[in-house]
Amino acid sequence: MNSKKTFVLDTNVLLHNPYSLYSFEDNNVVIPAVVIEELDKFKKESSELGANARHVARLLDSLREKGNLNSGILLDNGSFLRIEMNFHNVVLNESWQGSVNDNRILKVCIGLHEKGEKVYLITKDVFARIKADILGIIAQDFFTEQAPNYEEQYSGRLDVYTSKEKIDYFYSCQNLNPEDVSLYKYGSVLTAEDFVINQFLILHGEGNEKQTALARFDGQKIVPLRFLKERPYGVIPRNSGQKFMQEILMMSPETAPLVIIKGPAGTAKTFFSLAVGLHKMLREEPLVYRKILICRPNVKFDEDIGFLPGTEQEKIAPFLRPIMDNLEILLEQSDKSLLDCDKRVKEKIDELFGNNIINAEAMAYLRGRSIANQWVIIDEAQNLTPKQVKGIITRAGRGTKIILTGDPAQIDQPFLDSRTNGLSYASEKMKGSKLCYQITLTDEECERSDLAYEAALNM
């Protein structure tokens, strides 16, 4: 009996990751002919989708040297790849038009299923999965680049317990051993293997929960925070999450070149990133960074910005309104004379951009660059694909600090969710790197307003 499975790939899977072809070891991989037609429509786009379509074409073209794609080719990983041209005569429900591309893919699935193959449709299209289920075809998302469920993703923080004497020792001697704390009151002790390097800790007293201390695991010891007393650009952290966030932002680019900040709206992710960036640029000596560079995935690799009228700054200005709102608040807080004077606030912001202290760029212009000595904020990074986020992180040159901020629960891009977005992907892949510091803020740490806090908790 043939135990091999047959994985039928939808177009969106190949556009998401061209190497998905090689993700099904020792099984059959089928690309319906209609998928080749759909890929062909993307080949001229100057976007990530276009680049991926061309990449798939090159991969398939190179495989032609090994044999006939219609008959099938044995790949190096043991899987058998073929392009399926048949099953045009499969009858679907009369309400489903057989000429629609998704339905043509479903016809291939049904035809293979009727031939006795164990068919799995792999697609990132939810409705395609629903229709396949109606037809009795097993359908799945493409899982290779998925992070765990959001609640299970690495948060960069942990609550632990220890005795009053140990907390007193921590304050006086500035360190604790991992074996001095436990996950639960009076629970079994932990070891260094139970922690992740650069993980933040809230130490609770076992006899008195109000006795606490904030700390970080440095890979060997539990150590105190270094920047608790700092007030970057006059901003004061209001909760534990913001204190952890301030700590990783204040670190040097040599110590913490990659910072990942996740959390719901209103937790001041972008606000703090801008505040510390301005502090580093305007109030700290010697000067470490050449400028603050801001990018938002709303102006992404996929977007052909060249066809829009105006300068680059004019093209991306509508997408930077949230950044401007935060700058206005920061400037008004640092200079009370600017309160209720919109004209002067605007002049100050224009001055920051005009003097190249802050620069905003479209994602498309990051390709192929080496970005050195810059404070880089990638806002709303949950709207990036895994490939895009890798492309950004690998642009970092010496002296650059890259800050990824976002909320995996709020995603605007099709075919991305809380598990497949670039922010969650980077968080899981960089977990345990000594060069990456992460923190996830909670709904309870929303500080925007009482209404925003209530909405974060209840909606």
Image (cartoon, rainbow, N blue to C red):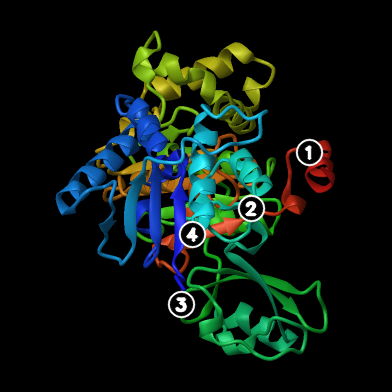
* Marks 4 and 2, how far apart at CA: 54 Å
Give whichever of discs 3 and 2 has the lower sequence position: 3
- Amino acid bearing label 4: Glu
Residue at left offset 53%, top offset 54%: 113
Residue receiving disc 1: 452
| Front: mark 4 or 2 | 4
Residue receiving disc 3: 219
Give whichever of discs 4 and 2 has the lower sequence position: 4
Residue receiving disc 4: 117
Quarter the C terminus occupies: top right
Give whichever of discs 4 and 3 has the lower sequence position: 4
Q: Are marks 4 and 3 in contact (CB under 8 Å)?
A: no
Where residue 242 is drawn, which disc sits there?
2
Q: How many badges with numbers are in the image?
A: 4
Secondary structure at numbered mark 2 = helix
* Marks 3 and 2, how far apart at CA: 22 Å
Where residue 315 is drawn, which disc sits there?
none
Q: Is residue 44 above or below residue 268?
A: above
Q: Position of residue 161 (x, y in %)?
A: 71, 81
